[in-house]
Amino acid sequence: MPVTLNLQNAPADNKLPVGTYDGEVITAEVASSASGNQYVEVRIRLTTDGFVGRQISKRLWITSAAMGYTRRMLQTILGYSLPDEDGFEFDEEELIGCAVRFKVVHKPSQDGETQYAEIAGFMAATDAVSETAAEKSTVTASRTKRANPKGFLNDDE
């Protein structure tokens, strides 16, 4: 059966606008790129009014070049410092349920013809700390809880 659509005021795309959003980590999985580099794919469900239920993801690369950035992002999401030790084992499932606040920017695609929404960085979700995240931070006694005094952390820092 045919359907009549009014497309006159429909947006050309449905990407998230540039801005700051709150959300909750719903999945965190370790995967590998085609070239064999590992990353943690963090998927977030938004809780910000007007965007509730929408999802966005961020890859945190597990390479020597990206490890400083990845460490800062993980610490910000988890709300505590990770230890300085070689061979530290991290369970990505600790991220699930964490409340997050993050900044979205628009970046051009590789061909430069379109733009996409990307998480530029995370900041402490002080106003939206989930019980799960709070419990995880107290259970991990060997790690020191810390605030994020710098606010947003991004690739430029």
Image (tube, helix red, strand yellow):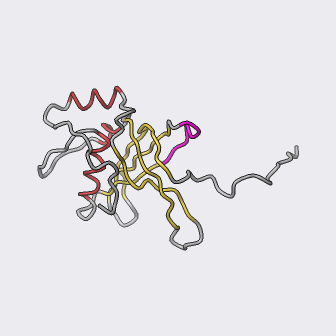
Q: Position of residue 16 (x, y in %)?
A: 56, 51
- Tell me: 38 left or right of 104: left
| Residue shown at the point (11%, 49%) measured from the top left | 85
| Residue shown at the point (34%, 57%) measured from the top left | 154
| Quarter assignment of residue 133 | top left
Q: Which residue is at the front of the view, 134 or 93?
A: 134
Per the rendered image, the range of residues in magenta is: 49-56
Q: Is residue 96 above or below residue 83?
A: above
Q: Which residue is at the front of the view, 152 or 100?
A: 152
- Tell me: 119 left or right of 30: right
Q: How many marks?
A: 0
| Quarter assignment of residue 148 | top left
Q: Is residue 82 above or below residue 70?
A: above
Q: Position of residue 47 (x, y in %)?
A: 50, 36
Q: Residue furthest bottom?
A: 111
| Residue shown at the point (88%, 43%) measured from the top left | 1
